Amino acid sequence: MLGREQAVGNDRIDKAMIHLLKSSRISLLILFALMAGAFAGIAHADTPEPGVRAVGDPPPTPTTPQAAPTPGFLTSPGGSPEAPAPPAGPSEPPLPPHPTPEQRLAGLTLEQRVGQLFMVAAKADGSDAGTVADLLNNHVGNIYLAGRSQAGLAATASVVAKLKAAISPAASRGLPLSVATDQEGGSVQVLRGPGFEPIPAALDQGNSNPDQLRADARQWGSELLQAGVNVDLAPVLDTVPSPEFAPSNKPIGTFKREYGFIPATVTEHGNAMAAGLRDAGVAPVAKHFPGMGRVRLNTDVSTNVHDTETSRTDPYLMPFKAAIDGGLRWVMISNAYYDKIDPDHAAPFSSEIMRTMLRTDAGFTGIIVSDDLCNAVQLSPWSVGDRATNFISAGGTMVLCADTASVPAMYAQVLQRAQADPDFRKSVDAAALTVLQVKAGK
């Protein structure tokens, strides 16, 4: 197109010059007019057609107002997070063949580091897979299968495989996805159906031989691993004081989630469960530090839940300490208050509980994961963003959230604070490194 217009212009110029030489009466003004017209045609050929953007041009200004996206998340026109496009500019430098966690951390953007600090709910039946995939492509690095599924092992494996396949390498930088679920036993067994054995309640497990329980747990863990689940949010290491008190202990005793009524029994059987899961290649999560066996109300559905007895050196801490000494790498924090430890802060916001008791007293170096910070009524006085930043500031590693709709706001607040507050940025970097170390098997 451009070549043809140039040829026409040149031809006009040639003819005009010949005519001028033959007849001196032709005005120079006509010649100049012909030359201007020719060059105007050439210039027009380099102008993009209406509606077509040239490379490097800014996008057109929208004619209708658009909702502001949540900072840190890409947003579709409908307002929901969408997978990010590959980053512009030069490609990221390749990692060495066997990168250390420190090298992996150095290769992550701040957005990717923050994403590793979140574990979000994914419906076990896969019905919200699109929403969860969007979160994963906005750097969220961990999920847990929630709700209840009777679909069986093969169907669950398909749900997990589809979620993993949807993750953009640019979003994850190749980091493995931690996939968890609540497979405690009894009334708390998320995954059932063909391929998943029914698991007895923890109180019934506590009546079995510890060696047999370990063998059983290895089988249950093997089923999880085949389904693509590599973290089990179990065992419960809370000690309920007595069978008589158990019905009044709404979160644990009411559902027979305790392994027994003295710390020694809980230690022996709870850690047999943990050992069997580890034998199968699944990471166990000890919960709910520093113990929920003495409270009456359930933090999921009640406010002002307090433990008035547990102390920093309490014998009920023994099951947790034994698990940590045995190499366990995940501990979940309770959402209750502990009046004899830190009466002014709920446990997920208490540096006394996480930094002093877990890190210093117990020598724990792994992942401190929260209980649900999104739907817990106990935490309703705080915004979801404050819950996330308070948890990380106090020494927490990974925010667990049961409400996918709350994740963008939580993520954005953590990211913004990390960008503005150097001390908080150090907490984020330290937590991200801990996650990478655990994912690397360290």
Image: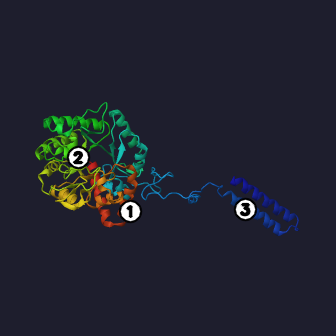
For residue 291, above or below residue 40: above
How far is disc 3 from disc 2 in space, using C-alphas?
A: 83 Å
- Residue 307, given in percent of the width and then of the height, sits at 19, 55
Residue drawn 14% across the image and 50% down it: 316
Q: Are marks 3 and 2 in contact (CB under 8 Å)?
A: no
Sequence order check, earlier mark of 3 and 2: 3
User: Between marks 2 and 1, how big is the CA–CA gap?
Assistant: 38 Å
Residue kind at label 3, given as amino acid type: Ala
Res. 107 visible in picture: no
SS category of the residue bearing label 1: helix
Which of 344 and 91 lies nearest the eye of the viewer?
344
Q: Which residue is mark 3?
A: 40
Tell whether label 1 touches label 2 (CB within 8 Å). no
Can residue 339 be seen here? yes
Q: Residue 250: horizontal and vertical position, in percent?
A: 23, 46
The circle on residue 416 is: 1
Residue 313 % position (x, y):
12, 56
Residue 278 picture quarter: top left
Comes first in the chain, label 1 or label 3: 3
Tag 2: amino acid: Lys
Q: Position of residue 243 (x, y in %)?
A: 14, 42
- Front in this rendered view, residue 441 or 406: 406
- Judge by depth and name the residue closer to the eye, 207 or 18: 207
Q: Nearer the viewer, residue 298 or 47?
A: 298
Residue pointed to by mark 2: 250
The amino acid beneath tag 1 is Gln
Choose top left, top right, bottom left or bottom right for residue 11.
bottom right
